[in-house]
Image (cartoon, rainbow, N blue to C red):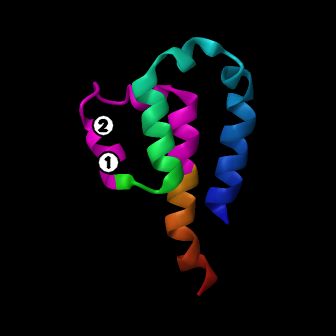
């Protein structure tokens, strides 16, 4: 529940950044986003580790995908 609310806030705050196309030039970030979207955490983590610390989270596409993935993983705990 909380992560859904947090995700909504992230989405609203990043909506202006999503329109900024400087992030679409970085194919590694887009690959990381795609891996997180399909749930391939191990592969996405290997790619994230190769970048400087927190640099992947500065990209709004990756940050939103990571929050969405975390929400998917934690959601069953709230349903019990």
Q: Is residue 34 magenta?
A: no
Give the percent coordinates (x, y) of residue 43.
Answer: 32, 48
Give the percent coordinates (x, y) of residue 36.
Answer: 47, 48
Residues shaded magenta: 42-67
Q: CA distance from mark 1 to mark 2?
A: 6 Å
| Tag 1 residue | 43
User: What residue is drawn where x is 58% and y is 71%?
Assistant: 75
Quarter of the figure with residue 45: top left
Give the percent coordinates (x, y) of residue 17.
Answer: 66, 21
Left/right of residue 16 with respect to residue 23 in the rendered view: right
Mark 1 secondary-structure assignment = helix
Q: Nearer the viewer, residue 27 or 13?
A: 27
Q: Is residue 60 magenta?
A: yes
Tell me: residue 26, above or below residue 76.
above
- Determine crowd level at label 2: few under 14, some 14-19, many 20+ residues with C-alpha closer than 10 A: some
Q: What's the mark number on residue 75?
A: none
Quarter of the image with the C terminus in it:
bottom right
Number of marks in the rendered image: 2
Examine the residues drawn in magenta and state their main secondary structure.
Answer: helix
Mark 2 secondary-structure assignment = helix
> Are discs 1 and 2 less than 8 Å apart at CB?
yes
Q: Nearer the viewer, residue 6 or 73?
A: 73
| Tag 2 residue | 47
User: What residue is drawn where x is 30% and y is 37%?
Assistant: 47
């Amino acid at each position: 529940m909380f992560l859904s609310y947090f995700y909504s806030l992230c989405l609203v705050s990043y909506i202006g950044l999503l329109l900024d196309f400087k992030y679409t030039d970085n194919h590694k970030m887009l690959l990381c986003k795609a891996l997180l979207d399909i749930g391939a955490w191990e592969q996405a983590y290997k790619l994230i580790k190769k970048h400087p610390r927190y640099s992947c989270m500065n990209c709004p596409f990756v940050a939103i995908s990571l929050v969405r993935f975390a929400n998917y993983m934690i959601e069953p705990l709230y349903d019990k």
